[in-house]
């Protein structure tokens, strides 16, 4: 694995997922985010006994607050890495990407799981949710139904299945002979199910990520015409793909810098290429739609909404163009900057129609309250803490296969710095 | 060799669809359910409100609160009497006054649920808690509502309200006095009590004809010589005649296409019988299986070369 397709000799640093052994498990950063998570979740628990009103800035005009519009509708776009990269790897056969799938899967799972928790606290009558189990009560044409059923299924079934190998692998390395024997029996079964499960794991989020945009169709004229379009479902889906690729790139770079992992510029360049294509595809549909609806003039009217539109477009256009240059793709620093811009642009697009470009008939303002913000931040902190722990206990981050170390045990916070030979199974 | 795989692909499709097959079954008729310009069924009831007659006595508001068992909203009056500022979780019906900023002109408006012919709230409600009931009344069922508030987001008239201050919150909106009066053969409280006849109850066809007669009799009295609600958002079962511009009294400018049609015209085709997701699952499944088999075939060699087990 030291030669790329053009025959150039490269040092391919990312060969497989390898746990992070360096440094303590509990770091100051982790403690900080853990504290935010605990405070926010405690507040969220109080919400069980409190009505939504005094707790949040939501009102009848802005009935959806940041928990729905940001934690669910925006952050699951960042969590769409498993969808975008999975399709690139398994459908379009981009073999290089297999090694970064685990980073995508773990981050995607955490975004979805925390988004679903957010949704659980946001709905006013959660006890009626059992209706989801009674198909004859479903309103099959409601995008909301599609989301409230598909999202939990995707997270609890498909994403969980996809991250199961991480857990089993750890059990294998830490377990005794009997565990290992049992896992050896399970392994072929998992592999037999795998192609079918990942097919589901791509079809289901394709459905609900587009339905998130479909939700906004019914809001009609409340959403500014630059954003309200019959193409919302497709644009939301394309934005999810864009955000997914951008966020995985961003996360890989950030985590590898944080844990001093060598970078693999071949794979990062591939991600950059994909990201550029995703940005261009999004922009093509976005502008095609604006031209089709004759909205181009108001898009460049330079009034407040037009400026927001132009900002959002610039945040996506800059990465799209910049990533066409090899120098940008293969310089980690510029790749990180550009991926951050794309993350911002994509999330901005997903967030704006639900908030800034959302103008209900009644004049009212919405700004999240402090508990609302803290709870929203807590969901994100849970994801950060989850990821911080996952990279240390499971083989999530890509690295040199030779870096494997068996001498780690479940929930042991202090580790010996012993290095073992490469793992064989 | 091919047949069992394609059968398995079909199975993947069903698994991939996550069991929402039944959802597709119930929505199979959705293409016909949301025509762009719905036609009112002959038994559809309606209200006609004419603000050239209304004196603003607010008897309808009191009657509404009484019949619906709503607590008086006394916040603005310091707890003395009922003065809601707008429709809210204690107010299903309100009379509001519009005063011209520079001039003596004024107009009243009565606001409540418009009972659209194809309501956006009903199209979006995930478990049919809001539904188009008998005679076209839009009613709410507490046992089905999860409190997602999508109805508030989707309603173009900003009608449904949520009890933000209650632990067991309900969606509060005018339900045409459905349970209280309509099913007992009585007209809604507001029209029954109105002393001037500015809001009247009847069949939608009859009221529409009546409204047009009034316009024909004295066209100068009415703004744009038309009935608001005849075509707005696909048509509503509350009709308005006004002496001032409709948007001045809080009746928004809306197209004549129903929002339900706009929102479901593409998805109702894609999700009909879940055909597109199943087809997609089949195609993706086939490609993935081919790539997977290739991946598995290369696995032993790869594991031998690197000395590490293949990671999924």
Image: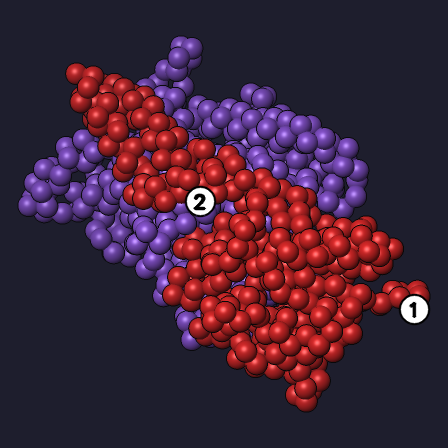
Chain colours: A purple, B red
Whether labels 2 and 1 belong to a single chain: the reply is no
Q: Mark 1 lies on which chain?
A: B
Taking the spot 44% from the left edge, 59% from the top edge, the residue there is: B129
* Outermost right residue: B103
Q: Residue B248, percent across and down?
A: 79, 59
Disc 1 packing (10 Å; few <14; some 14–19; many ≥20): few
Q: Which chain carries label 2?
A: A
Left or right position of A278 against A365: left
Spot occupied by residue A13 in the image (x, y as percentages of width and height): 37, 28
Residue at image point 20% right, 17% down:
B2
Image quadrant where one finds the C terminus of chain B: top left
Numbered circle sitting on residue B104 = 1
Can I make out residue B141 in this image? yes
Mark 1 residue element? loop
Marks 2 and 1 sit apart, C-alpha to C-alpha, by 49 Å
- Give the side of residue A279 with respect to residue A15, left or right: right
Label 2 Cα crowd, 10 Å radius (few <14 / some 14-19 / many 20+): many
Q: In this view, does A261 lie above or below B44?
A: above
Report whether residue A30 is seen. no
Question: Is the residue under label 1 in contact with that under label 2 (CB below 8 Å)?
Answer: no
Q: Residue at x 55, y 55 (%)?
A: B44
Residue A141's tag is 2
Q: x and y percent of residue B153 in the render? A: 57, 55
Image quarter in which the N terminus of chain B is found? top left
Q: Is residue B84 left or right of residue B183?
A: right
Q: Residue A20 appears in which quarter of the rendering?
A: top left
Q: Is residue A149 above or below residue A239?
A: below
**Helix, strand or loop under label 2:** loop
Asked if residue A60 is positioned above or below residue A75 in the image, the reply reads: below
Residue closest to the eye, B244 or A91: B244
Identify the mark at residue B126; answer none if there is no mark: none
């Amino acid at each position: 694995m030291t030669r790329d397709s053009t025959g150039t000799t490269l040092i391919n640093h990312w060969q497989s997922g390898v746990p992070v052994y360096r440094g303590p498990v509990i770091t100051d950063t982790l403690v900080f985010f853990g504290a935010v998570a605990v405070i926010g979740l405690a507040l969220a628990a109080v919400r069980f006994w409190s009505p939504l009103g005094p707790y949040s800035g939501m009102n009848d005009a802005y009935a959806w607050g940041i928990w729905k519009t940001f934690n669910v509708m925006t952050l699951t776009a960042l969590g769409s890495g498993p969808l975008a990269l999975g399709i690139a790897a398994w459908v379009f056969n981009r073999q290089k990407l297999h090694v970064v799938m685990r980073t995508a899967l773990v981050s995607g799972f955490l975004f979805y799981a925390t988004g679903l928790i957010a949704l659980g606290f946001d709905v006013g009558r959660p006890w009626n949710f059992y209706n989801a189990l009674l198909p004859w009560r479903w309103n099959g044409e409601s995008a909301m139904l599609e989301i409230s059923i598909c999202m939990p299924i995707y997270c609890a079934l498909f994403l969980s299945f996809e991250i199961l190998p991480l857990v089993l692998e750890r059990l294998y390395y830490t377990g005794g002979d009997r565990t290992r024997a049992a896992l050896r029996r399970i392994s072929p079964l998992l592999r037999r199910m795998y192609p079918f499960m990942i097919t589901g794991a791509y079809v289901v989020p394709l459905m609900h990520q587009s339905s998130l945009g479909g939700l906004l169709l019914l809001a009609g004229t409340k959403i500014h015409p630059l954003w309200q379009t019959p193409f919302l479902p497709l644009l939301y889906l394309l934005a999810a793909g864009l955000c997914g690729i951008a966020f995985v790139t961003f996360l890989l770079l950030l985590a590898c810098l944080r844990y001093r992992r060598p970078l693999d510029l071949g794979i990062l360049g591939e991600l950059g290429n994909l990201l550029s294509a995703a940005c261009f595809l999004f922009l093509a549909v976005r502008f095609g739609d604006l031209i089709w609806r004759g909205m181009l003039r108001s898009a460049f009217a330079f009034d407040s909404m037009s400026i927001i539109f132009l900002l959002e477009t610039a945040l996506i256009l800059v990465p799209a163009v910049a990533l066409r240059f090899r120098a940008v793709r293969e310089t980690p620093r510029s790749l990180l900057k550009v991926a951050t811009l794309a993350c911002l642009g994509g999330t901005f697009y997903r967030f704006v129609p639900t908030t800034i470009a959302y103008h209900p008939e009644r004049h009212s303002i919405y700004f999240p309250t402090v508990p609302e913000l803290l709870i929203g931040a807590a969901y994100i902190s849970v994801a950060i803490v989850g990821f911080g722990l996952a990279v240390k206990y499971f083989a999530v981050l890509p690295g040199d296969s030779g870096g494997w170390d068996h001498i780690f045990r479940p929930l042991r916070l202090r580790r010996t710095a012993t290095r073992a030979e490469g793992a064989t199974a | 060799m091919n047949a069992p795989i394609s059968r398995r692909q079909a199975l993947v499709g069903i698994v991939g669809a996550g069991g929402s097959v039944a959802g597709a079954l119930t929505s199979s008729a959705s293409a016909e359910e949301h025509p762009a310009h719905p036609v009112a069924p002959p038994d559809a009831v309606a209200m006609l409100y004419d603000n050239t007659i209304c004196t603003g006595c607010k008897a309808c508001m009191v009657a509404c609160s009484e019949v619906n068992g709503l607590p008086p909203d006394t916040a603005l009056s310091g707890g003395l009497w009922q003065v809601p500022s707008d429709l809210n979780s204690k107010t299903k019906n309100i009379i509001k006054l519009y005063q011209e900023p520079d001039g003596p002109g004024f107009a009243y408006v009565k606001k409540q649920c418009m009972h659209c012919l194809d309501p956006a709230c009903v199209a979006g409600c995930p478990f049919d808690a809001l539904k188009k009931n008998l005679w076209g009344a839009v009613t709410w069922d507490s046992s089905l509502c999860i409190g997602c508030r999508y109805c508030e987001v989707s309603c173009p008239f900003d009608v449904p309200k949520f009890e933000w201050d209650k632990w067991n919150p309900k969606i509060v909106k005018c339900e045409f006095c459905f349970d209280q009066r309509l099913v007992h053969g009585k007209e809604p409280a507001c029209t029954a009590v109105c002393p001037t006849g500015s809001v009247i109850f009847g069949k939608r066809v009859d009221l529409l004809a009546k409204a047009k007669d009034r316009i024909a009799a004295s066209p100068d009295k009415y703004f744009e010589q038309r009935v608001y609600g005849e075509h707005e958002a696909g048509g509503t079962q509350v009709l308005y005649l006004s002496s001032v511009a409709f948007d001045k009294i809080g009746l928004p400018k809306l197209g004549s296409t129903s929002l339900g049609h706009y929102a479901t015209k593409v998805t109702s085709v894609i999700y009909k019988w879940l055909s597109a997701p199943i087809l997609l699952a089949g195609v993706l499944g086939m490609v993935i299986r081919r790539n997977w088999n290739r991946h598995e075939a290369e696995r032993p060699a790869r594991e031998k070369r690197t000395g590490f087990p293949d990671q999924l």
